């Protein structure tokens, strides 16, 4: 039974209560608080997005839990709440971005996208027969003035932030961000700060689950993805950012060159490494000969393929997202 003060005032998002509250919007915000943690951290040369990828059921395929979305090459968003609602808004945003690109010959800036999606959120609070979207979005991107981070919620409000957190455990996350964040932190310091938030929020959650988080970093060099596991959270494994800090920026720049390393030109066809990668590709379902040849030509050894990311595979002619995911899944099994 509903509390008496809410009676008849929470039946639609178009009704205000006597004290000026819109209960349907508040219910949507509660759905977000129950969603997985998502955070955004602005650092000196980019934006870091962190999303909770913890798995409560061993039957769930972790790679299929998508909570981060690329809208344009310079704008991405992380979500918490009802992910089905998120997908609707993301699809609308991508269509809007494509229309702007075709009409004006350039990608829309982040302020245009955030104001547009916030307007959609607001519209869904003042019409009968619809409900507010049960999702909050953290937008990060770059324009001519630098990097920006925004947060929007079901009411249609949006605010620019230097760092923020939404979803389950967001209060602990915000407290840590307020205490430790500054705009002059480096990429690696931002990764460490994300881990600090993770440790604080996961400690208060008692349910058994396979802990994990995905970091997406947007910088001048594009998007970068880092997978954090329970070992990273408990300190059993070094952070990927810490490893990269030791090798310096040069290693990051040279990594893509592994795809077409000159050393491969001297390899003999039919060598053991090449046979191994062909055997691996033969075990991947729904691969045609052209795709197999393209992958084998780009990544001549299994070691090279081990270093590949989803986007690296999708650069090959004929390889889409689903195909790239099947190849990486087969590679994980082989390990």
Image (spheres, rainbow, N blue to C red):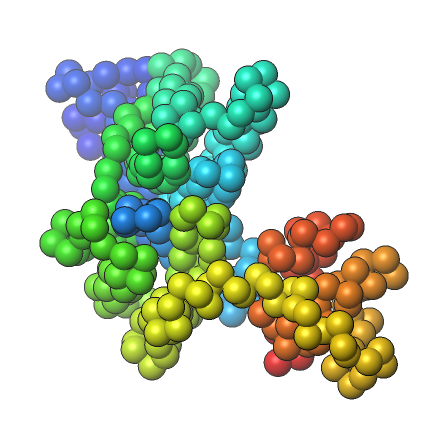
Residue located 24% across and 50% down the image: 170
Name the side, left or right, on which 180 lies relative to 262. Answer: left
Q: Quadrant location of residue 56?
A: bottom left
Residue located 82% across and 71% down the image: 282
Residue located 56% across and 56% down the image: 64
Residue 102 position within the rendered picture, expressed as x and y whole percent measured from the top left? 61, 21
Q: Quadrant location of residue 201?
A: bottom left
Viewport quadrant of the C terminus: bottom right
Residue 317 position within the rendered picture, expressed as x and y whole percent measured from the top left? 76, 50
Name the side, left or right, on which 77 lies relative to 262. Answer: left
Residue 291 position within the rendered picture, expressed as x and y whole percent measured from the top left? 81, 58
Residue extending farthest bottom: 272
Viewport quadrant of the N terminus: top left
> Which one is nearer the viewer's eye here, 35 or 174?
174
Residue 257 position within the rendered picture, expressed as x and y whole percent measured from the top left? 60, 63
Residue located 33% across and 39% down the image: 147
């Amino acid at each position: 039974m509903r509390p008496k003060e809410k009676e008849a005032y929470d039946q639609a998002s178009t009704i205000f209560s006597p004290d000026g509250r819109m209960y349907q919007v508040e219910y949507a915000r509660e759905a977000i608080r129950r969603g997985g943690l998502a955070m955004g951290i602005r650092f000196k040369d980019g934006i870091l997005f962190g999303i909770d990828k913890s798995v409560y059921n061993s039957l769930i395929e972790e790679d299929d839990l998508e909570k981060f979305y690329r809208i344009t090459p310079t704008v991405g968003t992380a979500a918490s709440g009802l992910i089905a609602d998120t997908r609707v808004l993301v699809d609308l945003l991508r269509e809007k971005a494509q229309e702007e690109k075709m009409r004006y010959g350039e990608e829309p800036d982040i302020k245009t996208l955030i104001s547009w999606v916030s307007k959609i959120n607001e519209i869904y609070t003042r019409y009968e027969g619809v409900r507010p979207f049960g999702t909050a979005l953290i937008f990060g991107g770059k324009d001519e003035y630098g990097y920006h981070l925004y947060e929007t919620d079901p009411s249609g409000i949006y605010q620019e932030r230097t760092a923020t957190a939404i979803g389950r455990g967001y209060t602990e996350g915000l407290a840590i961000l307020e205490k430790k964040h500054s705009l002059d932190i480096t990429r690696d310091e931002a990764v460490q700060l994300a881990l600090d938030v993770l440790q604080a929020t996961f400690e208060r959650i008692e349910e058994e689950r396979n802990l994990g988080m995905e970091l997406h970093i947007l910088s001048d060099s594009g998007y970068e993805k880092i997978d954090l596991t329970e070992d990273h959270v408990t300190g059993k494994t070094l952070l990927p950012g810490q490893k990269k800090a030791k090798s310096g920026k040069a290693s990051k720049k040279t990594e893509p060159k592994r795809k077409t390393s000159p050393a491969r030109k001297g390899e003999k066809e039919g060598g053991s490494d090449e046979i191994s990668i062909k055997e691996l590709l033969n075990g991947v379902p729904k691969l045609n000969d052209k795709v197999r040849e393209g992958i084998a030509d780009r990544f001549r050894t299994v070691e090279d393929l081990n270093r590949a990311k989803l986007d690296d595979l999708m650069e090959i002619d004929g390889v889409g997202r689903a195909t790239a995911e099947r190849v990486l899944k087969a590679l994980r099994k082989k390990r």
